[in-house]
Amino acid sequence: MMFNWLSLVTGLFYIVLGIVVIYYKFFFTILEPGVAYAMGGLLILYGVFRIYRAISKIKSSGNEE
């Protein structure tokens, strides 16, 4: 159960990191705008996927109890 909540927080972290990469165009090195948008977009999508998966697991574990 704790892993599901941790996965939710991690998803939020990835979304924030994606926004930061898009805004500052920096991820361990200075990025070209196209690369920054692509990388930021992928980070945001992965964060949304993690949150979706965590919520679906939390709901399914709530039905089992």
Image: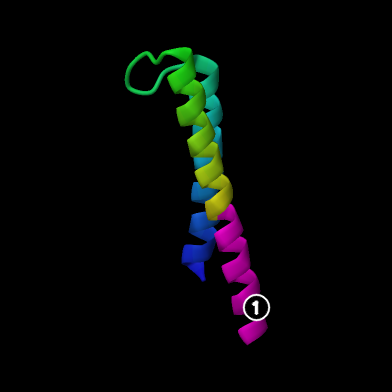
Please, what secondary structure does the residue beneath circle 1 have? helix
Q: Is 1 covered by the magenta stretch? A: no
x, y percentage for residue 64? 62, 85
Residue in the image at 56% along x and 61% along y: 53
Q: Quadrant of the C terminus?
A: bottom right
Q: Residue at the bottom extreme?
A: 65
Q: Is 57 covered by the magenta stretch? A: yes
Does 31 sit left or right of 22 as displayed? left
| Vertical side of 23 occupied by 53: above or below | below
Coloring basis for residues: rainbow
Does 61 sit left or right of 28 as displayed? right
> Which region of the structure is painted magenta?
51-64
Total labels drawn? 1
Q: Amino acid at mark 1?
A: Gly
| Vertical side of 18 occupied by 54: above or below | below
Residue located beneath label 1 in the image? 62
x, y percentage for residue 47? 53, 45
Residue in the image at 49% along x and 32% along y: 17
- Give whichever of 10, 36 is nearer the camera: 36
Residue in the image at 52% along x and 71% along y: 1
Residue 28 visible in the displayed image: yes
- Give whichever of 48, 7 is nearer the camera: 48
- Give whichever of 2, 16 is nearer the camera: 16
Residue 65 visible in the displayed image: no
| Vertical side of 42 occupied by 20: above or below | above
Q: Main secondary structure of the magenta part?
A: helix
x, y percentage for residue 18? 51, 31
Residue in the image at 65% along x and 78% along y: 62
